[in-house]
Structures are given as structure tokens and as C-alpha cells.
Amino acid sequence: MKLGVVYFLLVLGAGFILGTVRVLLMVPSVGDRAAELLEMPLMVLATVLAAWWITQRFPEPSDNARRLVIGGIPLSLMLTVELTVDIGLRGMTTADVILN
């Protein structure tokens, strides 16, 4: 469980930093969609680097069930945070969050 939370925090931190740069610096000059598309490869790189760092730092579990749990924890945490922020702070509906 610890590995999943660490991975979530690393990717969330990278997303927070890149998202701030995207909104403040890139959106005014290139627009929303273009800024998101420019940010996307950097987020993919951040997720790969976070996964690599975790596999180098912590022992890898031997069974597939534990590996799925480690991957499912950050996925469920990220979806929870995304829904909470979008519905609670931005006033979007669940359908808006899923479609956008």
C-alpha cells in the first residue's frame, strides 16, 4: 500500500507543478487544448520516471495480485481527487468531469 501512495504523491506533485505552469504561462498564448497537448508528454515522462524510481528504491512484490493493488491505489486516489476538485471546487457535474 505504501508504494501506491508514494507513486500517487509523486505523480500528483508533478501534475500540480506542470498544471500550474500550463495554466499560468501556456494557456494565455496557445489556448486550453494546445496547452494540454503540450503538457501531456511531460506528464507521461513524469509517470514513467516515478514508476522507475519506485522500482529502484523499493523491493518489487513477487505476486501479480499485490502488483495490481499497488497500481489500483494511485488510480483510485487520482480519480477521487479529480472528482472532488472538479465537482466541489469547479462546480462541474459528474458527467462534465467524465466527458471533459
Image (cartoon, grey):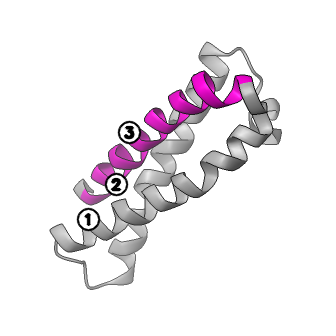
Q: Give the residue at x 58% y 34%.
A: 82
Distance in Å between CA atoms under marks 3 and 2: 10 Å
Residue at the (38%, 82%) spot, across then down: 64
The tally of labels here is: 3
Q: Is residue 25 magenta?
A: yes
Q: Distance between the residues labelled 3 and 1?
A: 15 Å
Upstream in sequence: badge 2 or badge 1: 2
Cα distance in 3D space between marks 2 and 1: 7 Å
Residue type at tag 2: Tyr
Q: Where is residue 26 in the image (x, y as percent from the top left)?
A: 65, 31
Q: Name the residue under label 3.
A: 13
Q: Where is residue 29 in the image (x, y as percent from the top left)?
A: 73, 27
**Residue type marked 1:** Ile
Label 3's element?
helix
Q: What stretch is highlighted in magenta?
A: 3-28
Which image quarter is the C terminus in? top right
Residue 86 shows in the view: yes
Which residue corresponds to mark 2?
A: 7
Callout 2: 10 Å neighbours few (<14), some, many (20+)? many
Residue 65, compared with residue 35, is above or below; it is: below
Percent position of residue 52, x then y: 32, 70
Q: Mark 1 points at which residue?
A: 54
* Kind of residue indicated by mark 3: Gly
Mark 3 vs mark 2: in front: 3
